């Protein structure tokens, strides 16, 4: 009897290992300028995306992924004194349609963590919305659009 149970467990494990799992949705980081400040955004975005374990992250644009486009610049006064950062992020679906946007200002590089948490939340919320609707249809106001 014990060997029969062991054989069943072994077969179940083999079948599970050979069954392809559903591919995780992915989110990628797309810097929209050559500003050195964009480097402050990548790691916080990656940490926020990977937190749940439900998503893949790519450090640059990747086909089939939801993209977080980031444009960040230092804010400098007329007297050449740095007073903070301006961070713009736009989230697009895999077909390039904009689904979220925000503009964040802050006095130091720590503001990038807050901005990228917002960006990841925008992307994840929209991914989950698409996954929960039949055939990827999303109703927005009076219209319906298909995302897949």
Image: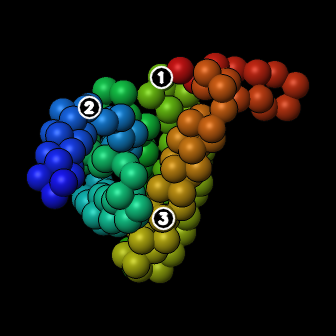
Name the residue nearer the viewer: 41 or 129.
129
| Residue indicated by mark 1 | 95
Residue 76 x, y percent position in the rendering: 43, 70
Does residue 123 show up? yes
- The total number of labels drawn is 3
| Residue indicated by mark 3 | 117
Compare marks 2 and 1 and give the one earlier in the sequence: 2
Left/right placement of residue 4 relative to residue 76 reads left
For the residues bearing labels 2 and 3, Cβ distance under 8 angstroms: no
* Distance between mark 1 and mark 3 Cα atoms: 23 Å
In the image, farthest residue toward the right: 142
Compare marks 1 and 3 and give the one earlier in the sequence: 1
Neighbourhood count class around disc 1 (C-alpha, 10 Å): few under 14, some 14–19, many 20 upward: few
Compare marks 2 and 3 and give the one earlier in the sequence: 2
In the displayed structure, 70 sits above or below 97; it is below
Residue sitting at 44 percent across and 28 percent down? 94
Residue sitting at 50 percent across and 35 percent down? 92
Q: Quadrant of the N terminus?
A: bottom left
Left/right placement of residue 114 relative to residue 44 reads right
Neighbourhood count class around disc 2 (C-alpha, 10 Å): few under 14, some 14–19, many 20 upward: few
Element under disc 3: helix
| Residue indicated by mark 2 | 20
Left/right placement of residue 82 relative to residue 124 reads left
* Distance between mark 2 and mark 3 Cα atoms: 31 Å
For the residues bearing labels 1 and 3, Cβ distance under 8 angstroms: no
Neighbourhood count class around disc 3 (C-alpha, 10 Å): few under 14, some 14–19, many 20 upward: some
Element under disc 2: loop
- The tag on residue 123 is none
């Amino acid at each position: 009897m014990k060997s029969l149970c062991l054989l069943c467990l072994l077969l179940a494990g083999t079948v599970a290992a050979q069954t392809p799992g559903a591919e995780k949705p992915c989110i990628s980081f797309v810097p929209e300028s050559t500003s050195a400040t964009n480097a402050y955004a990548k790691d916080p975005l990656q940490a926020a995306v990977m937190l749940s374990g439900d998503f893949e992250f790519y450090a640059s644009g990747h086909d089939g992924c939801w993209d977080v486009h980031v444009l960040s610049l230092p804010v400098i006064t007329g007297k050449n004194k740095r007073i903070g950062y301006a961070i713009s992020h736009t989230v697009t679906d895999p077909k390039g349609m904009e689904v979220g946007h925000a503009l964040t200002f802050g006095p130091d590089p720590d503001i990038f963590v807050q901005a990228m948490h917002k960006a990841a939340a925008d992307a994840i919320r929209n991914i989950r919305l698409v996954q929960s609707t039949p055939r990827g249809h999303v109703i927005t106001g009076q219209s319906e659009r298909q995302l897949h």
